[in-house]
Image (tube, rainbow, N blue to C red):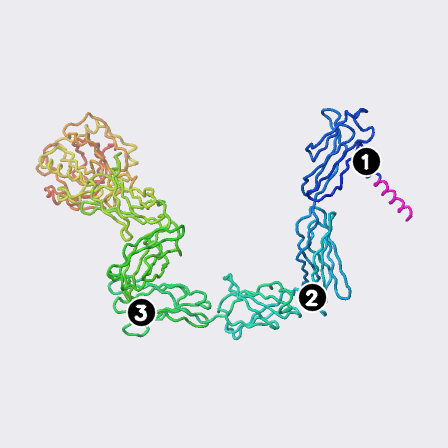
Amino acid sequence: MARTVCGCSWALIFIIMSLLVKAKIDVCKRGDVTVQPSHVISLGSAVNISCSLKPKQGCLQVSSLNKLILYRFHRRIHFQRGHSLSSQVTGLPLGTTLFVCKLACSSKDEIRICGAEISVGVVPEQPQNVSCMQKGERGTVACSWDRGRDTHLYTAYTLQLNGPKNLTWQKQCSDYYCDSLDLGINLPPESPESSYTAQVTAINSLGTASSFPCTFTLLDIVRPLPPWDIRIKCVNASVSTCTLQWRDEGLVLLNRLRYRPVYSRSWNMVNATNAKGRHDLVDLKPFTEYEFQISSKPHLQKGRWSDWSESLRTQTPEKEPTGMLDVWYMKQHIDYKRQQISLFWKNLSLSEARGKILHYQVTLQEVAEGNATLQNITERNSWTWTIPRTGIWAVAVSAANSKGSSLPTRINIADLCGAGLLAPQQVSANPKGSDNLLVKWTSPGEGATAVQEYVVEWRELHLRGGMQPPLSWLRSPPYNTSTLISDNIKPYICYEIRVHALSGDQGGCSSIRGDLKHKAPLSGPHINAISEEKGSILISWDEIPAQEQMGCILHYRIYWKERDSDSQPQLCEIPYRVSSKSHPINSLQPRVTYILWMTALTAAGESPQGNEREFCLQGKANWSTFVAPSICIAVITVGVFSMRCFRQKVFVLLLALRPQWCSREIPDPANSTWAKKYPIVEEKKQLSLDRLLADWPTPEEPEPLVINEVLLQVTPVLRCPHHPNWPGKGQRLQGHHASEEDTGSSASSPPPPRALTAETGPAVDLYKVLGSRRPDSKLGNPASHLTVLPVDYLPTHEGYLPSNIDYLPSHEAPITDSLEELPQHISLSIFPSNSLHPLTFSCGEKLTLDQLKMGCGSLML
């Protein structure tokens, strides 16, 4: 069985070799290509290439018809007719070049004969800088070297190590880029002074080169492993003495350690000889996170440093704070007895805090008494308190951690802007770059020599009703008149900037507004109120939200124009003021309705317009105001005019010119008994004008009760939203508005008979005031005098005449008294103004509203 398997293997090998030989023969079956002196040559050498045809492999028996062509890659370099071709080639580049010989029997077809590759290279250079290293006590020896320039040929490198007792170790790499080898052996630590020699040899087809021998001992090449198990311990939880401990290999004699705060880039280096795995550190900062690393070496002069160990990160213990807080304050007057102080302070630096600040202690005292008036503890960086305006007050602030407190910062509460001679001049704030504001000023004139320091404070523009924004400040020496603000500055925000000049407990200040970037505001101011004051109007508006201002507002603009006019609006430009959000306008015409709106401007442009408001300036009071200041009614009398009645009507008609908003409402007659039943009855009763005239009272009938219709009739309609109760924009005024034809109609010329119909519109108010005929008047007398009765003169029930009136006064009431008591608001008339007739109703001797149903008949409204 074994022989059979072996026989099959040899047969398979023979078949494969036969195929390979046949393939080679098939490739060059027509001829051969030869190269002299070799297929591998050095750079700059020449080479002869020959191509020959085998017998009977030409185009025809005549050899002169054979054309042999030599190609270098795909470029033709030589051709010759016959059975052979020979050419010398020079100047070949480094690397491999392919040559191919072809046979051309016609002008189109070419037959491949054979080809050859020529490699161009250089002799290997001598290997340099041979070095060996063993990682740790139990590591293996690995050597590396510099190969020199590339040979462009296959080159083999052999590493040989010779040791004591004629020990030899050898290893080879056969690769184009071989420059290191690991022998896989460990030099014993028992003989660290024993000598070893390493040498590298490079060989290729053009030559050989060997390095110089490299001699070393174990201590020269060993590289210890990095230390491990690193830890730190501070005595009594104090940074005065902290000990760093670690573990390393036994042959290590020297250590070095480096440490730094984690926020620092530079390291502190310390060498520790015979450290035995520990070292004391005495210069560490309290409450600081440090990073520690350690490296080892087996000998003071020999050997190599190990890699750095893994980092140990730890925070040192706390210590009482040092330094003093930077404190600033603001003072605001509440009233004539009290004032409010607000203190602000900055955080201590890490080196000053030396621990976690738990709280701040604020001590307030009155200087005259010398005793602490108030002690308070806060965790915030600000404190506010109310103190009397009398006396001199001082405040002390200190920071505390778990180990103690810092020295207090003491300041006297004074008026920082009270000394006008110390006020800085020509303050300006302009962007500097993309993230900074440059604030400049000039020294105060006479008080420049007394200035001890400048303080520049800034905060976001404080809008009324919003939260107080945080305050920031910088201190500057007296010889500086500019500072660069970069902290807490954002684009498209307006900042209030104030420059203080301090001298002892006195100070002067100047302020300005500035922004880093600005755009046109996103919205306009909102007009919230318009009031009339002494012939002019006062416009009040709301501040634009801070997030929509997009920088510092420089001006406001108020626009106005007549409501129904197409003319260009007028405008008034107002400089921005923080404290004022109102402005008067004196150029409006009385009794003209105007539309008003506002915009805001920054240095980048104008905002969209805000809301629109309508307003009508009433102007000064006229003569009608003094005649009847609270009555806005018109009286149309049903009957024949007399001189006295005419005077009354003219007087009341003038009162009708008063605006409707000045009237006061009276009870609605629709609540009377008959009015509640009328909607059912009116469907059954209709009365034409003919029947109404047929039922006209005769002299023999009892004397009728003359009724006056009181209605509101205002011309023209006022649309000015001046009175507080005036309807808003888009609402309609209730009431009837008479036309010019109505007012011009004569009651003595009745129109042709026609049915009386109700005017369309809202529900109408019925008769409120009754007139009585004088005792001496006759029935149907056109000149009979009519008397206007005041409402409160008659006994009433919910504002109406009761049904059991036994007496109506016939004497004439004084016109002034009656007018003062007239109702203040009356709605539409039930009669068309151009078709009034003197009507008399036969309803008995006494007539009440409960009995009155538009003529006691079936008259349809």
Q: Secondary structure at mark 1?
A: helix
Task: Tell me which label, 3 or 2, sits earlier in the chain.
Answer: 2
Q: Is residue 16 magenta?
A: yes
Q: Nearer the viewer, residue 104 or 788?
A: 104
Residue at image mark 3: 394
In which quarter of the view is residue 296 placed? bottom right
Side of 576 where 699 appears, left or right: left
Residue density around tag 2, few if under 14, some if 14–19, many if 20 or more, within 10 Å:
many
Q: Nearer the viewer, residue 583 or 160?
A: 160
Instruction: Find the distance from the CA under tag 1 to the CA under tag 3.
Output: 113 Å
Residue at image mark 2: 218
Which disc is residue 25 wearing? 1
| Amino acid type of the residue tagged 2 in the rendering | Leu
- In the rendered structure, which segment of residues is drawn in magenta? 1-17
Residue density around tag 3, few if under 14, some if 14–19, many if 20 or more, within 10 Å:
some
| Amino acid type of the residue tagged 3 in the rendering | Ala
Q: Is residue 681 magenta?
A: no
Which quadrant holds the C terminus?
Answer: top left
Instruction: Find the distance from the CA under tag 3 to the CA under tag 2.
Output: 75 Å
